[in-house]
Image: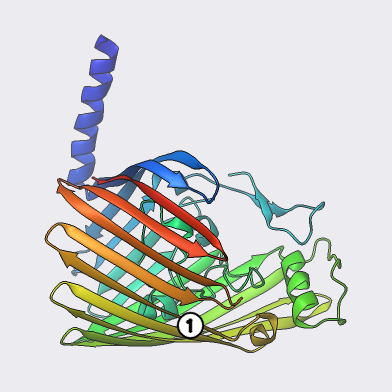
Amino acid sequence: MKKLLLASTALVLSAGVASAQGVSLSGDARMGLIYDGTDVQMTSRARVTFTLSGETDTGLAFGASFRADNAATRNCVLDPADPLGDFDCTGTGASNGNARMTGGEVFISGDFGKLTMGDVASAARAAAGDLYGVGLTGLGDLNEMAYLDRAGFGGLYTGQSYATAALYEYSIDGFSGYIGLGQNNTARAGDLAAIYAVAFPGVLPLGIVFPGEVVRDNMYSVGASYSFEGLTAAVGYEYSRARATGIPSFTASHLVASVEYEMDGISAKAFAGRAGSDLADAVASRNQYGVSVQGSFDATTVTAFARRSFDRTRAAGIGASYDLGGGASIVGGAVRAAGNTTADFGLSFSF
């Protein structure tokens, strides 16, 4: 018991020193029940976020943030037994800035704007964003629209896991502009072959394998938004080109637009996106779109969304939360997609 008390005291003292040096801790947790369409199961999770901050003698702000669950290092390789599948990973995170593993962010900012590297969104996503989410666990995050910086085009385009990503943003008088870059040099030939087999039938056999080949995948994106008296309009464009020895390059483009209005605790948002280049031929539909609404009344917030994705899947969700104060909330929601209904309910905590 004495050793435990001494260790606890040392931890508290060290935390105080770290905070004085611009290092702070925050976190979130949840506990409750989730219905997966068949069974009801318990669910719980706790996460800690480390936030580092500082300032130069000339007034430039800099810092970084990462979660405890992405501070480790992972190595991912393509499974030879399943060349068209995803990677087998053995642990990459904030230690080397791998965006695929959500490995944290590092930034510097000043009068020139803000430059962030690491697990950052594309400029299009930063400008247009997603629909409002529901549920304690997110229920599959089906409120999130598909962008090139994340998997989501009907499972076809999976080369968006950029090992290095950067986002520049600048804001003035209600206007915000964004420029993004993603770079990836990794063994993803199996993914590219799978895309071609669907996008260009007969050009390549579905089971084609490119052992040891390296796919180079670069993404460029721009975005802008303008806010005036509760109304925010945004547009964005992203483009990527993946290529590997032995097969033609695959290009993907995505044009997005969103409109959001907030007034007296009620907000509404509409979103639309259109796929282009080779990607337009690989997805079932070139268009994705959705709407969402959210209203807060005293301590209660009610949220709903509906969307259609590039693979023509329709999803709709509704949820509510009640603020208990002190960072605790009662949260619940339900989502229906592809003929299946999922739901959850429980307690959410923020620290």
Q: Residues within 10 Å of mark 1 (few under 14, many from 20)?
A: many
Q: Is residue 134 left or right of residue 295?
A: right
Point out the image quarter for the N terminus: top left
The colour scheme used here is rainbow
Question: Residue 232's quadrant in the figure?
Answer: bottom left
Q: Is residue 228 left or right of residue 188?
A: left
Please, is residue 131 above or below residue 229 in the view? above
Q: Residue furthest top?
A: 1
Q: Position of residue 182 (x, y in %)?
A: 53, 73
Query: Which residue occupies 26% across, 64% down?
Result: 302
> How many numbered badges does the structure rendering display?
1
Read off the residue under disc 1.
221
Q: Secondary structure at mark 1?
A: strand
Q: Is residue 107 left or right of residue 163?
A: left
Point out the image quarter for the C terminus: top left
Mark 1 is on which residue type? Ser
Q: Position of residue 278 (x, y in %)?
A: 68, 86
Query: Which residue occupies 63% across, 44% down?
Result: 90
Question: Residue 148's quadrant in the figure?
Answer: bottom right
Q: Position of residue 56 (x, y in %)?
A: 22, 63
Q: Position of residue 251 (x, y in %)?
A: 66, 84
Please say whether residue 55 is visible from this viewpoint.
Answer: no
Q: Nearer the viewer, residue 329 or 59?
A: 329
Query: Which residue occupies 46% across, 75% down?
Result: 307
